[in-house]
Amino acid sequence: MNKLSYIGTILVFLLISSAITSLFSLFELSLGIFATIPLIMMMYLSLLDGSLETRMLSISYSISQFICWVIGFLGCVYLLSPKGFDIGKHTIVTMVLINLVIWGSLVGTSIAKPFKKNPSKCLNHNEKITNELTYKGFQITGAIFVFFMVVNYLSGGFFARQQIGNAVETGSPLYFLTAFSTLQYLFFLFLGVRLSRPILNQSNIVSLIILIFSMLVASLTGGRGFSIRMLIYTILGSFYSNLKSKDIIKFIIISIPFVLFFTITIGNVRGNLDFSDSINLVTRAELIGKAATGNLEATGSDYDDPLYSTFTRIAEPTGQIVIDHVVETGSYIGLRNFERITTLFIPKIISDKKPMDDGGERLRDEYGVDITQFTNAPITSMADAFERGGYGAVFMFSLIMSFYLTKLSGYIGRLKNQLLRITLRISFAYTCSVLYAPSILGCISIITYNFIRDGLLIWGLIFVLEATTKKIKNVHEKA
């Protein structure tokens, strides 16, 4: 069976599964399975015609929406509902909306870059970076990572989740730390790039130990996103290493259960008040060890139950509140607050402007969600688009986002600097993986202002890296 027949069989199986689950009145599950079809088509066709890197940002955006509104949402519907948790009233509408998002993304990327009629063999992802650059990049970004971790601890960032929530004072150390944080993750990109065959050689084992240790240190904050981002950057970096495709696949497969175990363990330890109340890293490390071995008793709120916190954190129930309201009232808000776009490129440090992402304040003022200076909640871009213009707005927003992200990745691919192309795509791809959470205005801010800011920071780092490498090379040649 050739690859085309194989993928065709999978799509037919999904269609049949969607129909069968519908017959059993599992309508949410049926629509969730149906939403898988455009996502698989997008990734397979991209791989087939060699455009995977060009569509990397769009695919990352689509996968994050899928994880939130299919995996997370169905987990809430079918696993948490029997325990008494009610995620919302109009769950079928939500599953219709996620289909509009994923199909809209497929249409958007297809318009931006039509799939080739005569596909090439496959994507050649092994675009190598020179050894001199990878070694120097590993050194410089490693120093940056250590610096960020130290400053993060000294400035209180390690305990910000409990102490300051989402309110970071403009001009504070944490404010600048957040703005420049994109640079610290590049260390793990170079960590992945420097992996070599065979997969279990001494150098790789050292690199993996560094990765695991860094993830564990970051987990002392009580958060999971920072650590998982390290792993994702390492995996993406491995695509440009000397590893073979089968080695990378093994790496990814091994990472999946590790991520699940890590996610559940941290979710469990956050349910212990001794962890959340402590600012002693040794105490926190001991509690994480107990949670990993099943010897820790949860003493916090129900929200900190591992299963509950995992699925509700993925699905973001606050978005469902908005969806239910729109279905019941039929009212839309159109372009409310869009005038904030006029101040988009004015840095907050020099202007007392309202935040671009208006989701939190709308949830607080219009839906009574408990949002304070210490807490926040996402409205989600899908729910925001639905409140602004209904089903059509959801489809068009996703189409436009996917079109823009595909074009942007295409422009990045035209850059002559190989290392700059790779670092920009990987950094932006991760950012696109969290675009499910902000409002539409928040998404606009991220894909414009944040991309420009991060792009300039990365360009500056690559410039210094290449200049340093060239200088050292000249010295060696003269010697």
Image (cartoon, helix red, strand yellow):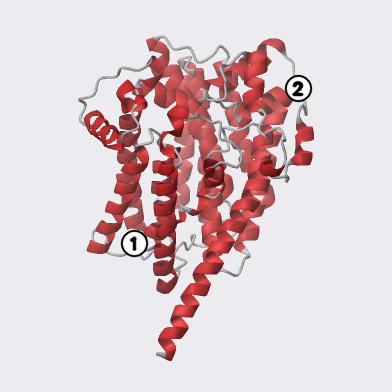
Q: Quadrant of the C terminus?
A: bottom left
Residue type highlighted by circle 2: Ile
Residue plotted at (49% across, 26% down): 315
The one of 445 and 120 positioned closer to us in this rendering: 445
Earlier residue among tags 2 and 1: 1
The quadrant where residue 116 appears: bottom right
Residue type highlighted by circle 1: Leu
Residue bearing the label numbered 2: 333
Q: Position of residue 202 (x, y in %)?
A: 22, 62
Residue 52 in the figure: left or right of residue 156: right
Residue 416 image label: none
Residue 195 image label: 1
Residue plotted at (53% across, 62% down): 461
Eyeballing the image, is 245 above or below 340?
Answer: below
Name the secondary structure under disc 1.
loop
Residue plotted at (33% across, 56% down): 246
Q: Tell me how far mark 2 sits from mark 1, CA to CA.
A: 51 Å
Name the secondary structure under disc 2.
loop
Eyeballing the image, is 9 above or below 461?
Answer: above
Q: Position of residue 429 (x, y in %)?
A: 54, 48
